[in-house]
Image: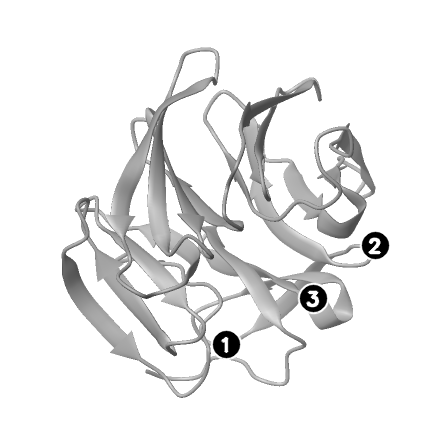
């Protein structure tokens, strides 16, 4: 392991996008992009309590979860952040986001909502035990959700209308507390584990393939770089 950047105020929601690692720097309310050499650039400032997590619409516009306000913000062409959807009807706080190829944004907390490209919101799942990191399989047909307090990765089938069905345990984390997650090119999942100070790679069914031990709690993880 090597450190690319330090002195941050709680970095979260890492995403590999346009050949750089993007993340939310909670302590400064900024979205930052970082290249492999460690050069950082502030890409947006979010004037809300915390920019919890980020993803992009298919046309390249950035979406930001303003979690404590239960708002989904969108960056327009002039760089301004405007409301994309108000989620407060469904829960007071939201956490993680993932966007599918149709432009539907899935946003979670204790429940999970689907936000259509036009900003229409509907609940598609409930009863999550602290919904956290999410990932879509490459074919867009399966949504995997980390339930931190449930100590599991759960999966849903994604319908053509972005409905979620066939809820199931994708992997029991065997005492782990999955936070941020990502998928590799074999279909296995990496999850960050805060209390156990590690990142763990598991396949569907729960078999552990790799473990990376670290010296502090891991909140999120992402694969990137030219070799993935």
Which sits earlier in the primary sequence, circle 2 or circle 1? 1
State the SS at label 1: loop
* Residue 95 relative to residue 169: left or right: right
Q: Is residue 23 above or below residue 144?
A: below
Query: Residue drawn 41% across and 11% down?
Result: 160
Which sits earlier in the primary sequence, circle 3 or circle 2? 3
Where residue 44 sits: x, y (%)?
74, 55
Where residue 167 sits: x, y (%)?
35, 29
Which sits earlier in the primary sequence, circle 3 or circle 1? 3
In front: mark 3 or mark 1?
3
**Crowding near pointer 1: few (<14 within 10 Å), some, many (20+)?**
some
Q: Is residue 108 above or below residue 119?
A: below
State which quadrant residue 110 falls in.
top right
Residue that mark 1 sits on = 38
State which quadrant residue 83 falls in.
top right
Q: CA distance from mark 2 to mark 1?
A: 27 Å
Asked whether residue 225 appears in the rendered view, the answer is no
Query: Residue drawn 48% across and 11% down?
Result: 161
Residue that mark 3 sits on = 26
Q: CA distance from mark 3 to mark 2?
A: 10 Å
Q: Residue furthest top?
A: 161
* Residue 161 relative to residue 70: left or right: left
State the SS at label 2: loop
Where residue 34 sits: x, y (%)?
53, 67
Residue that mark 2 sits on = 48
Query: Residue drawn 73% across and 32% down?
Result: 87
């Amino acid at each position: 392991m090597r450190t690319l950047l330090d002195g941050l105020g709680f970095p979260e929601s890492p995403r590999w996008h346009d050949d750089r690692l993007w993340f939310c720097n909670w302590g400064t309310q900024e979205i930052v992009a970082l290249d492999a050499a460690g050069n950082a650039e502030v890409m947006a400032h979010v004037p809300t309590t915390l920019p919890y997590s980020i993803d992009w619409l298919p046309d390249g516009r950035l979406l930001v979860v303003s979690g404590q306000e239960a708002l989904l913000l969108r960056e327009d062409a002039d760089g301004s952040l405007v409301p994309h959807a108000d989620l407060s009807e469904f829960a007071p706080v939201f956490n993680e986001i993932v966007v599918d190829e149709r432009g539907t944004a899935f946003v979670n907390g204790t429940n999970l909502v689907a936000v259509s490209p036009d900003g229409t919101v509907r609940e598609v799942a409930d009863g999550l035990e602290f919904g956290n990191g999410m990932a879509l399989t490459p074919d867009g047909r399966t949504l995997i959700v980390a339930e931190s307090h449930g100590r599991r990765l759960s999966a849903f089938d994604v319908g053509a209308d972005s409905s979620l069905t066939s809820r199931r345990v994708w992997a029991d984390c065997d005492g782990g507390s999955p936070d941020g997650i990502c998928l590799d090119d074999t279909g296995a999942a990496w999850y960050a584990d805060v209390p156990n100070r590690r990142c763990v790679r598991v396949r569907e069914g729960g078999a552990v393939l790799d473990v990376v031990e670290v010296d502090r709690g891991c909140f999120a993880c992402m694969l990137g770089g030219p070799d993935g």
